[in-house]
Image (cartoon, rainbow, N blue to C red):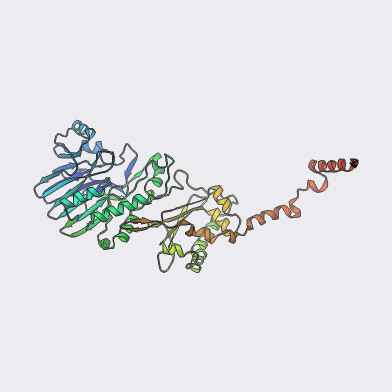
Amino acid sequence: MKIHLLGHASLLVETQNCKILMDPVLWDPFCEGLNESCPKREVMVEQLPKDIDFLVISHRHLDHFDLRSLAYLPKTMDVLIPKDPLLQDCLRQLGYTQIYSLADFTKVCAGATTLMTTRSEVQVPEFGMVIADESGVFWNTVDTYFAAPTIQAVRANFPTIDFLLTTWHISMEGKYQANQPLAFPLQYYGCLFNLISLVQPKAIAPGAQGFKYIGESAWQNQTVFPVTRERFCHDLETAFPTLKETIFQLNPGDCFTLNQGQYEQFLAGSDYAKMLVDDRDLVDFAPVIAGNPLTDPNPEQIELETLEQTIETEICQDFLQFILEHQRTLFYEHCHWQVIYQIEVTFPNRDRRRWSIDFSQDTIQVKPGRNPHANLFSYITASSLYSLIHKKRDWDYLLCSGEYRGFHSIYSMSQWGAVSPDMTSIADPIRLRFSPNYIASNNVYEELKKWTSPDSVPPSTKSEPTLFQLGNLLIRLKKSQQPANHSA
């Protein structure tokens, strides 16, 4: 069996005797102009096979049910859909005639190939799909929430799942707009891993969720996708160490083959699609800057070169040395929970620079750039960090000005679920480095100097009294002229 990833949820599956096209979205943008494939891709539409046997539409959401793509495709295919009148009506109006609305766990057999729909627990009429032939069993869960009874039903029909293309994002669309928490969805994420443990796949890859928001909606990319693909695969390896060699990450244009227990990924191996740019950093979860990115007002007008040199030296040398000196004390819990810390500094010219520190390593180092496995994040303006280094401002200013922000997604994963630490024991490393004890109210005393030195008094007050001072003098005179009050 050969599986071509065309992008996001669009697949072309070649079995021994069938070609199956699932959820074709062949052009960008899609979803009424809101989304593009991520990573960015191109589908060579004219090269797609003309002899496709089955067209499968998993559900009505427009990143799976794209009318433009369906209008382009040949109308002679057998179309398999869930029991959804909207899908059926639209497909008929597009010219499709062989449309089959299938219930859960319905099997369709074509020679050596068997297809079976799988149940979803969500409200929208929807199914996943098992595709099996003599080479193996492939289960594409698409967007479905596959509960334990569904897994039992699938394994009753197919005891061994050779390859699971799994739901993996606990997507958070609409949370920001409804003023709901944007904290990492730990409970649901842990439940997902428990379900995967019940499936017991021989090989696995994250599927679908390969899109980004564009245009005026692009700010949502920082609120929707709480885990990176790399982090998900890292968590899979942690929870299921026996799968270490059979965890795959597919990009548009990749092919994946399974053949009686043998698995192979062919990077850019498809003739039907190709990845143009790996731009998945655009969908990194960062709810504290969504729609309101950091800007550095640089109130002291510090030279950009001075900021850059000072911060580079601090993070790569002094900060690192501080961590190494306190690795077994202040940073004991960071090491225990395998924290991967990423700090992003925004400069006055809007340039952003990132560094990461991996506390899970025996030798802790500072590395420049993005770390897709990071789980503790800090965002700070360059001038604010500079002021901390030189004790010119304290944390009250940084927090009240909004020039410092942060969040975390720290947990420990197993096949039974996830647990999280008591975050009071895992402070932001930058706040440990520049603690109130380090600043020691130096900023207040520096300000005090301005108002206690002789030069701080305006010249006019040295030569003649102010109205305020004259008023106090008259009050004192009146009080001194009043007769004493003798009690009888």
Q: Is residue 250 visible?
A: no
Q: Residue 456 appears at what percent x and percent y?
A: 73, 52
Q: Residue 350 appears at what percent x and percent y?
A: 49, 49
Query: In the image shown, does 487 or 53 lie closer to the viewer?
Result: 487
Q: Quadrant of residue 176?
A: top left
Query: In the image shown, does 425 or 169 lie closer to the viewer?
Result: 425
Query: In the image shown, does 376 or 123 lie closer to the viewer?
Result: 123
Q: Is residue 220 visible?
A: yes
> Which of the image's four quarters has the C terminus?
top right
Query: In the image shown, does 28 or 457 lie closer to the viewer?
Result: 457
Compared across the picture, whether 343 is left or right of 206 comes to: right
Q: Quadrant of residue 37?
A: top left
Compared across the picture, whether 44 is left or right of 413 comes to: left
Q: Residue 348 appears at what percent x and percent y?
A: 52, 50
Q: Residue furthest left?
A: 111
Q: Quadrant of residue 143?
A: top left
Q: Residue 168 appears at what percent x and percent y?
A: 30, 50
Numbered marks: total: 0
The correct choice, above or below, for 133 with respect to 216 in the image is below
